[in-house]
Amino acid sequence: MENVHLADEDDLYSGYDYNPAFDTESEGNPVCGARSVRSPSACFVFQMTAKFPGTSTGGRPVGTSFGLRNPMASSLGRPMTGAVQDGAARPMTAVRAAGYSSTMARGSTFDPLGQSKGAAPPLESRNDDTPEEKIKILEKKVNDLIEESCMAQSRGDMQLALDKAKEAGRKERALVRQREQTGTADHINLDLTYSVLFNLATQYANNDMFPEALNTYQVIVKNKMFSNAGRLKVNMGNIYFKQKNYPKAIKFYRMALDQISNAHKEMRIKIMQNIGVVFIRMGQYSDAITSFEHIMSESPNIRTGFNLILCYYAVGDRDKMKKAFQKLISVPLGIDDEEKYIPPNDDPHTNLVLEAIKNDQLHQMERERKALAEKFIMTSAKLIAPAIESSFAAGFDWCVEMVKSSPYVELANDLEINKAITYLRQRDFNQAVETLKMFEKKDSRVKSAASTNLSFLYFLEKDYEQADRYADLAMMADRYNPAALVNKGNTLWVRGDHEKAAEFYKEALRNDASCTEGLYNLGLTYKRLGRPEEALDCFLKLHAILRNSAQVMYQLASLYEMLEDPTQAIEWLMQLISVTPTDPRVLAKLGELYDSEGDKSQAFQYYCESFRYSPSSIEVIEWLGAYYIDTQFCEKAIQYFERKALDTYKDIHRKFPENIECLRFLVRLCTDMDLKEVQDYATKLKKVEKMKEMREQVRSFRSPPGGRSVFCCSCGQSHTLLPSLTSACVRACVRVSAADSGQSSHGTSAKGERLSAKLRALPGSNEPYETSRQQVLDASYVDPLGPQLERPKTAARKRNEDDEFADEELGDDLLPE
């Protein structure tokens, strides 16, 4: 530090050595040709000022051009180093640092940024009133409107997207007029005009305004200044396709195909695929086959292969169906193997990378493409299996063999399971079970799926032991199979072990949180166990997944009713009737809740709605009848009690179809209520009475031990009836022989006498049911309560018939007095 001096000291260059070789004062010229020991390449001249000479000079004059009135110039014409120009000395090379100047020695301060000169002059303000600036601002507004329109479309707000597109169109036309007024029409932005028109046409199409969209597309297509506008004819063809104008759609597709060069192969393939689809809609399967076959030969893809199989199936070409299926399963998907996502080692960095790309958008797209391919292959196999062979089983076997030799080998087992499901649809339960049992010795995944299906089938058949057995097998093959766990829980639920069933449902949910069956069953289990709060939690979670499930909403309403919260129960039932507005039980439940709350008017409204959709509900009829009695409308109440009686008798008739008294009451009720069933019940009553009459005749003419002679009108001969023998022909029609001709038969003949063409049924006042009006019946109708017949029996009357006919009138004891 001894050679370091501050700037205000006298000796500024004490740290430098003086070389007398550079002293040129005596000679009058600088020496540049000589080389010093320290500088082998060139001569260096140190910059020194004349005012403050260095100490190393010994007070002698400076040996450079400092102080010269006419400094010497170099051979290239530039000033020499250290020459003073314009009051400032030129710095010496390789000595002075950037930003320093020798003028500092003359009293100036260090100011490399020039701040001592004062503040910079203010920037000129932009004049927005100029025509060019106005045009730029307007162009920016148009671009912003187009962007806002596209963003609104991506959000699904089609109306807002259309409004923004229209506004962009108005702004763009104003922009064009402004350029024309300023004389800059040559600078019109054609790309902006194209973007505005294209976006407007797209938004018209999205809002189903097809004529406006077609007109806008025509403006673009007819403008020769727009390059490649012919491609938009594809969009026009799509609009005609939506309008089901298929000939025009094909016309525009072909026009677009003619304007697209062979260099754009993918675009041409897509247009040809559209043409094939239109031919399918028109029923022209041969033309569609031509398009699809060309695509499969040039650039095969899964969707086109599937459409080709559909066309061959429509024309019934069995051999080509097989060939097309083979082409379908050989189409490359262009996706990587799943094994690349398996970590090869324990490197944490590699594992993190694989974990990151395992669920990225590219991998999701690959999974979707693979799932779509598997769906098309499975659908094609199920479609053509019954058509390509003599039986669907043989067709499935052929498809399975083809799939096994393809990249989709894992689908072979799924096809076998679909074969079993097809057996089920044909109601061949045994074959379905046998097919599924074949998977018991295969790998774990397929074995688990087959056992799960078997468990489900046996559960539907109420063979709970077998269902439990196959549920166990499915869990042994794959413990993480949620369906198997749910089936196991179901078998335990049926046995009454609800606690253990709940554990299996919980395990199914731990393995698959989206297992809605397990969540629903768990809620039912908690409800059965008397834990409504936990059940409510399950069904609320399920409602978040299945927003429109009527069953879930009903369970929520039922649970709130159990928790004595009728307000919430009514709210959930209101949501339920918005999904199923014609469910009579839900409407009746709403009426019941409103009735419990004391709101009779709302209860009456929902009970009436329930009765309108289901007039046979006894509970609803009882409530409405009681309501009219309470409100002093007895005539209205009679109608509902008539309906109640009618439903009661219908139920009795279903159980005892030959009960005469039940049929008589049904005839009278239907007559009084103007129901169409009156003729049906009258016909049934007539048949039953005739059967009873014939049986009574057979019983009354039974012979004593000696026998009795009777005449048969069927065979025209006399027979002797014995107690142990009754001839079949005599059962049909029996008449008393000439030996018994003294007995009169006018009583029985009167029973079979028919009334005139029109008969009015006038019941007696002492009969068990009194009609309020008369009814005109058909001529073939026989009055069930005429004076020639006996009165209906009541429960108190004692029968005197033989035991042989005791079961014929068993229903009499069930009738009310």
Image (cartoon, helix red, strand yellow):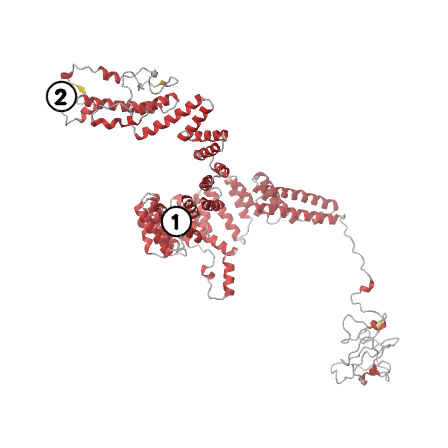
Left or right: where 278 falls relative to 466: right
State the image coordinates of residue 461 (x, y, percent, origin top left).
32, 44
Whether residue 209 is visible: yes
State the image coordinates of residue 808 (x, y, percent, origin top left).
25, 27
User: For the residues carrying marks 1 and 2, which lies nearer the camera in this image?
Assistant: 1
Q: Is residue 581 above or below residue 23?
A: above
- Name the residue: 68% across, 44% down: 171
Quarter-of-image position of residue 799: top left
Per the image, the residue denoted by label 1 is 499
Badge 1 vs badge 2, beta-carbon distance below 8 Å:
no
Left or right: where 2 falls relative to 696: right
Q: Amino acid at mark 1?
A: Glu
Q: Is residue 247 above or below residue 416?
A: above
- Looking at the rendered structure, the secondary structure element under dot 1 is helix
Q: Mark 2, residues whose alpha carbon is within 10 Å: few (<14), some, or many (≥20)?
A: some
Which residue is nearer to you in this view: 637 or 170?
637
Q: Quadrant of the C terminus?
A: top left
Which residue is nearer to you in this view: 431 or 567?
567
Per the image, the residue denoted by label 2 is 708
Q: Amino acid at mark 2?
A: Arg
Quarter-of-image position of residue 64: bottom right
Quarter-of-image position of residue 686: top left
